[in-house]
Image (tube, grey):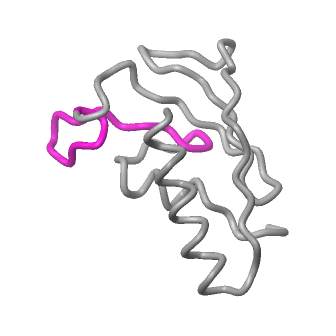
Amino acid sequence: MQAFVREVEAQAAREGETRGYEPQVGEPVRDPGADADGRFGWVLPVNGVEVRVLMPGASSDDVQGLGADAPALFVNGKPVWWPSAVMSAVPLPGR
């Protein structure tokens, strides 16, 4: 989850610079009640929105892979691979 948060922070900074706002990424909070199918639930506050993430219980290298065998993350209920998950986790403020 730490690697994911670092990439979300970098993406939020790029979005903020491009769109002219101050990005806000908070600390991830474990949500064990959301755990499912070998994935661990987290809530990550980004730009005033609680982003819900189900992180696979796999190595960071495996999760960040783009091959057919890479496990998907779930961001707000949608299955996505790492690069799309990072972008999906950065909502525009006020949306």
Q: Is residue 32 above or below residue 23?
A: above
Q: Is residue 52 above or below residue 86?
A: above
Q: Residue at x 59, y 86 (%)?
A: 18
Q: Residue at x 29, y 42 (%)?
A: 64
Left or right relative to 82: residue 43 = right
Q: Quadrant of the C terminus?
A: bottom right
Specify whether residue 17 is painted magenta. Answer: no
Quarter of the image for residue 37 reads top left
Q: Which residues are magenta?
A: 62-77
Q: Where residue 9 sits: x, y (%)?
A: 57, 57
Q: Where residue 29 sits: x, y (%)?
A: 70, 27
Q: Where residue 65 sits: x, y (%)?
A: 22, 43
Left or right relative to 88: residue 32 = right
Left or right relative to 67: residue 53 = right
Q: Where residue 16 sits: x, y (%)?
A: 66, 76
Question: How many circles with numbers are drawn on the protein?
Answer: 0
Question: Of helix, strand and loop, which mostly describes the magenta segment?
Answer: loop
Q: Residue at x 40, y 25 (%)?
A: 56
Q: Residue at x 23, y 32 (%)?
A: 62
Q: Is residue 7 above or below residue 54?
A: below
From the viewer's side, name the closer residue of 26 and 46.
26
Q: Is residue 34 above or below residue 81?
A: above
